Amino acid sequence: MKKQKKVTAFLASLLLVLSLVMPGNFIQVEAATGDMAVHFIDVGQGDATLIKAGDHAMLIDAGDNSEGTAVQSYLNSQGIEKLDYVIGTHPDADHIGGLDVVVYKFDCKKIFMPGVTSDTKTYDDVMQALKSKNQKAQAPKPGETYTLGDASFTVIAPVKGYGDETNNWSIGMVLQY
């Protein structure tokens, strides 16, 4: 069973890479037990990934500003009412642009963003959405591990500050199921 879970995690990682170079609305990977699914949502240039483990869900990024409603619709189509984790990997618009819609429309338990800010309207929109829900984004630290149903993920990046290039501040993690 452990080997099967490692193979599933490997395939999910492989599909993440493939999703960056292949068009399509989404790719779904399900474990043989049906307890975990990874959805790569087509949001144009940006990123949006939904991970479901049992009754638990995590969203990583939400595409550009114009994609917030599309991400909301996709989450609704998947029966998502609450998100255990919402991760804005870094504050560029093509990653966090739709997060304000997600924060407004869903019950988001924990919201992670790196310890770097931006002076853009997109970043401000996300901060205003968080404020309206009395929430704050947390900057996770490398080595911290969190559970998502029967899965867990460990934060591996960013390790330190990386200057003005916001992509270099991206939150990275290893998901284990």
Image: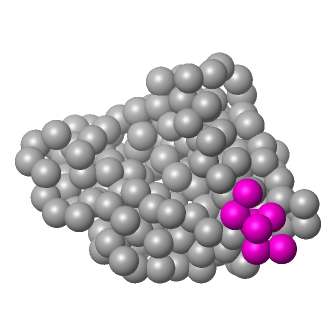
**What are the residue bounds of the magenta stretch?**
1-7
Along the line of sight, the residue nearer the viewer: 4 or 55: 4
Q: Residue furthest left?
A: 163
Considering every residue shown, the one lying at the far front of the view is 3
Residue 101 seen in this snapshot: yes
* Residue 160 percent coordinates (x, y): 16, 63
Q: Position of residue 143 (x, y in %)?
A: 36, 77
Decide if residue 9 is on the left or right side of residue 68: right
Q: Is residue 6 above or below residue 18?
A: below
Q: Is 98 situated left or right of 116 in this image?
A: right
Closest to the observer, 134 or 95: 95
Q: Is residue 59 left or right of residue 156?
A: right
Magenta stretch contains residue 3: yes
Q: Is residue 119 left or right of residue 130?
A: left
Is 122 or 158 nearer to us in this picture? 158
Q: Residue furthest right?
A: 33
What secondary structure is the magenta-colored segment mainly?
Answer: helix
